[in-house]
Image: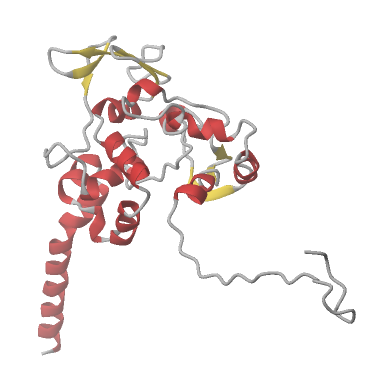
Amino acid sequence: MKRYQIAILLVGIIAIIVFIMPDTLSMFSGMHTFYADKNCTKCHSGEYNEFMASQGYVRNAHLRAANNTNYTTYLSISGISYNNTHIVTNYDGDGDGTSDIWEWNSTIDKWQRTSDGTTNAVSLDRDRNNEINGYEVCHLCHNSTIFGFSGAHTSVVRTCDDDRCHGNNNYTYNNQSLFTTATIGVTEAGALLSQGNVHSPLYHLLINQSSSYPAGIPFNNTPGNSIDDRLTKGYLSCGACHGEITTNATTTTEVHNTHANKSSQRRKYI
């Protein structure tokens, strides 16, 4: 009887493993399966709801960026300069000894590497409804492949002052022409924070502190917003103004000396 129970237990365990294995593989086998089968909001609904509740122009700007295939392609091929016809990179993806250059091929509506004809067009719109929604927007900051971590088995964290997002005090690889509706300076906000304005002291304080997020070496380049092997906390200066924080506070009014009574406590004049 005991052997029979053990056999049933083993069969049950095997059945559970078979049932959950597809989900495990889809989470860690790479970008394409991850896109096709996984909805990030199933586990991270709180983070998604916080994003959707953020300031309208911040939320909409990131949704536009996620839906801009020129930008997502630019990120995925290590772009450092962009115009309507060419993307210049700082990565030798084909191993020919020089950094790749990609040009727009209007015949196939894709970017094409000039050295070997390889084509590329990265879209986060996996359900093909011409808009970014739900889990799709998460990949703009967390998809490992887009940020040059093709060997990674899980998502990554790229912060606001990433070299190719809003830049930092070392590098700004983004440029205005990527966003036709952007406000001037938005795409280099991280760099502007380091240039002696009212927000600079906070930013400089935070970029000298390391976060818990691994920096890695995306596209064989050390990120400008890193300390040793970790990203800095510089991104928190962005959240200080653009994040949603709820506080409960009680304010009191300071009472000054009115000189109405000669025996009153000595205090400042009104």
Is any part of residue 152 visible from this angle?
no
Residue sitting at the far right: 262
Q: Residue at x 13, y 62 (%)?
A: 18
Q: Residue 219's image quarter?
A: top left
Q: Residue at x 35, y 15 (%)?
A: 100
Q: Nearer the viewer, residue 43 or 236?
A: 236
Q: Position of residue 267 (x, y in %)?
A: 84, 70
Q: Position of residue 128 (x, y in %)?
A: 11, 38
Against 122, residue 241 (above or below) is below
Residue sitting at the far bottom: 1
Q: Nearer the viewer, residue 144 or 268?
A: 268
Instruction: Decide if residue 79 is on the left or right side of residue 30.
Output: right
Against 98, residue 141 (above or below) is below
Q: Position of residue 50 (x, y in %)?
A: 35, 57
Instruction: Decide if residue 186 is on the left or right side of residue 103.
Output: right
Residue sitting at the far top: 115
Q: Nearer the viewer, residue 91 or 89?
A: 89
Q: Residue at x 33, y 55 (%)?
A: 53
Q: Residue at x 43, y 26 (%)?
A: 184
Q: Nearer the viewer, residue 26 or 176?
A: 176
Q: Position of residue 108 (x, y in %)?
A: 13, 16
